[in-house]
Amino acid sequence: MKKATSYIKGILFDFGGTLDTHGVHWSEQYWDAYVNACVPVSKPQYEKAYVSAGDGMLEGKIKPTDSLKTTLGIQIRLQLEHLAAAGYIDKDSITYWAPKILEACYKDVKVKMSYTTQILQYLVNKYSLVLVSNFYGNMETVLQEFGIRPFFKDVIDSAVVGIRKPDPSIFSIGVNRLGEDVSQVAVVGDSFERDIVPAKKIGCTTIWVKGRSWRNEPGGPEADIVISDLYSLKEIF
């Protein structure tokens, strides 16, 4: 593992798939819950529902005051509605499956967020932190939900600024909010295409949390440091 050096003064963090699931892509996180709940669908069927629900989430369904649990619940219902419309599950079964999937996902996130809190507490004593996330306008509420908002100097929510990853300019906004030179900023994210590649384009040091993704991301020279879990950040910094 390559060590970050003393030139780093600020860190930009991704949220979804990074701070909340520690490198597990949300498609995989949901699928684990589907399997454990014995939902009678195949993974290819589910993945189409996941994509459809993801598109639906961008249509103003989330309020700024919605918690992560509420957000997950809405996305799960959209997935199940897609599966029902496709004839894979009975429409009446949505009310049975939805709470089972939600509780499994949220329980896992709460456990991981407790460790995330410890890591952020460690880092904030040495570095300025800003969050940069593709989200739905409620990122501030979600951070308050888990008690980690005070760790961040600022929060860049794609729905608020009107720019989504992989557009590099959303990371430029993050760098400006940090108030540090781009050459002194590290970006931590789980998506090679959406976090690492665009952050590298603007000159940041990149730390790729290479966990479990639903798509093969072979990576490349854009990732200065590759880690398999967030705990490794204590070794790097």
Image (cartoon, grey):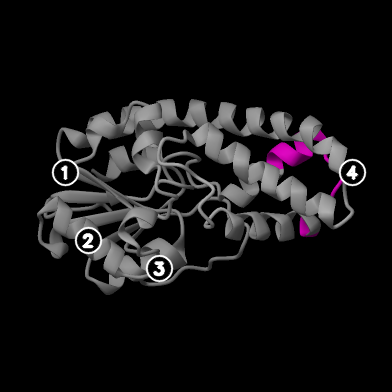
Residue receiving disc 4: 90
Which of the two marks, 1 or 3, is nearer to us in this view?
Answer: 3
Q: Is residue 53 visible?
A: yes
**Residue 150 higher or lower than 235, as above or below:** above
Compare marks 2 and 1 and give the one earlier in the sequence. Answer: 1
Q: Nearer the viewer, residue 60 or 124?
A: 60
Compare marks 4 and 2 and give the one earlier in the sequence. Answer: 4
Q: Residue at the spot x=64%, y=54% of the render?
A: 53
Compare marks 4 and 1 and give the one earlier in the sequence. Answer: 4
Q: Residue at the spot x=83%, y=55% of the render?
A: 85
Under tag 3, what secondary structure?
loop
Residue 128 image label: 1
Q: Residue flagged by tag 4: what amino acid is it? A: Asp
Q: Nearer the viewer, residue 93 or 110?
A: 93
Q: Residue at the spot x=83%, y=50% of the render?
A: 84
Horizontal side, residue 6 vs residue 232: left or right: left
- Quadrant for the C terminus, please: top left
> Which residues are drawn in magenta?
32-44
Under tag 2, what secondary structure?
helix
Residue 160 lies, in percent from the top left, at: 33, 54
Residue receiving disc 3: 166
What is the CA distance from the residue labelled 3 to the residue labelled 4?
Answer: 37 Å
Q: Nearer the viewer, residue 88 or 40?
A: 88
Whether label 4 touches label 1, CB < 8 Å: no
Which of the two marks, 2 or 1, is nearer to us in this view?
Answer: 2
Horizontal side, residue 178 vs residue 235: left or right: left
Compare marks 1 and 3 and give the one earlier in the sequence. Answer: 1
Q: Residue flagged by tag 2: what amino acid is it? A: Ile
Q: Residue flagged by tag 3: what amino acid is it? A: Pro
